[in-house]
Amino acid sequence: MLPAIAQDAETGEVLMLAYMSPDSYAETLATGRAVYYSRSRKRLWRKGEESGHVQQVRAVYVDCDNDTILLSVHQVGGAACHAGYKSCFYRQVTPQGLKIVGQRVFDPEQVYKSGH
Amino acid sequence: MLPAIAQDAETGEVLMLAYMSPDSYAETLATGRAVYYSRSRKRLWRKGEESGHVQQVRAVYVDCDNDTILLSVHQVGGAACHAGYKSCFYRQVTPQGLKIVGQRVFDPEQVYKSGH
């Protein structure tokens, strides 16, 4: 299981980090859509399977140690985060605590019927 | 121990992924320089301690699940990768195999006396 970073192909924004199993990596390469492995649900996680917000993979990179994957993606729907933000990294660490700096694209209540 | 992504503050390029312990995270926030935890050497890894190529931290973000850190950094020396490339993700996965697409900034032989 390796960490995989998804980066917006158009803006360069780092969208999220998830994990890939050999199966999810193979399916990502074969289909051109980001497929991760959900450690909490213990199964393949075809990103966007519930929300429709799939990630179309433009390019795949590996790091020098062969233990991290970087995906350059087009994020359908404009938001990678289940909380409705463009990026999962929508909070900045400041001396005053966490500050929301991200851009909210959708309301999760409207997208997920049964919560997430 | 959490994964931490370092992103170039100027270009948006994803430079590397490493890991942070509570101690390395605290020292990063306190000093404004990226400090990781080396899993192979089992100790704090003050990025650039050997090469001089430190990372000056411009901003720190956390993801929605509070289990990944994103650093926006200025990379002194222009290269984050010990192999001399700007980014550790200097190889692209293509149908023909791995292809070097990154930009080499320095020769590791000149920077590390005893290899890496």
Image (cartoon, coloured by chain):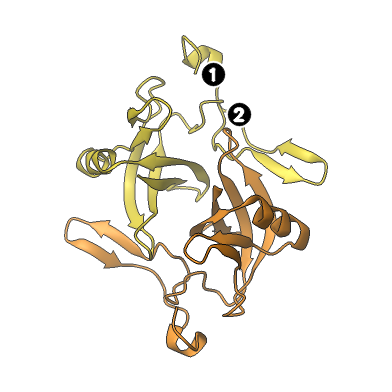
Chain colours: A yellow, B orange
Q: Chain of mark 1?
A: A
Horizontal and vertical percent position of residue A65: 38, 63
Using the image, tell me which numbered label, if any, was put on residue A108. Answer: 1
* Residue that lies at the very extreme toward the left in this rendered image: B96
Front-lying residue, B1 or A23:
B1
Identity, as a three-letter code, of the amino acid under mark 2: Arg
Identity, as a three-letter code, of the amino acid under mark 1: Pro
Horizontal and vertical percent position of residue A62: 35, 58
Mark 2 crowdedness (10 Å alpha carbons): few <14, some 14-19, many ≥20: some
Describe the element under mark 1 as helix, strand or loop: helix
Q: Quadrant of residue B63?
A: top right
Placement of the C terminus of chain B among the 4 image quadrants = bottom left
Q: Chain of mark 2?
A: A
**Residue drawn at (59%, 40%) of the image:** A89
Q: Is residue B107 visible?
A: no
* Residue that lies at the very extreme toward the front in this rendered image: B42
**Residue drawn at (57%, 19%) of the image:** A107
Q: Nearer the viewer, mark 1 or mark 2?
A: 1
Q: Quadrant of residue B52?
A: bottom right
Q: CA distance from mark 1 to mark 2?
A: 10 Å
In the image, is residue B76 above or below residue B23?
below
What residue sits right under mark 2 in the picture? A104
Describe the element under mark 2 as helix, strand or loop: loop
**Residue B50 shown left or right of residue A33 in the figure:** right
In the image, is residue A112 above or below residue A9?
above
The tally of labels here is 2
Horizontal and vertical percent position of residue B29: 73, 55
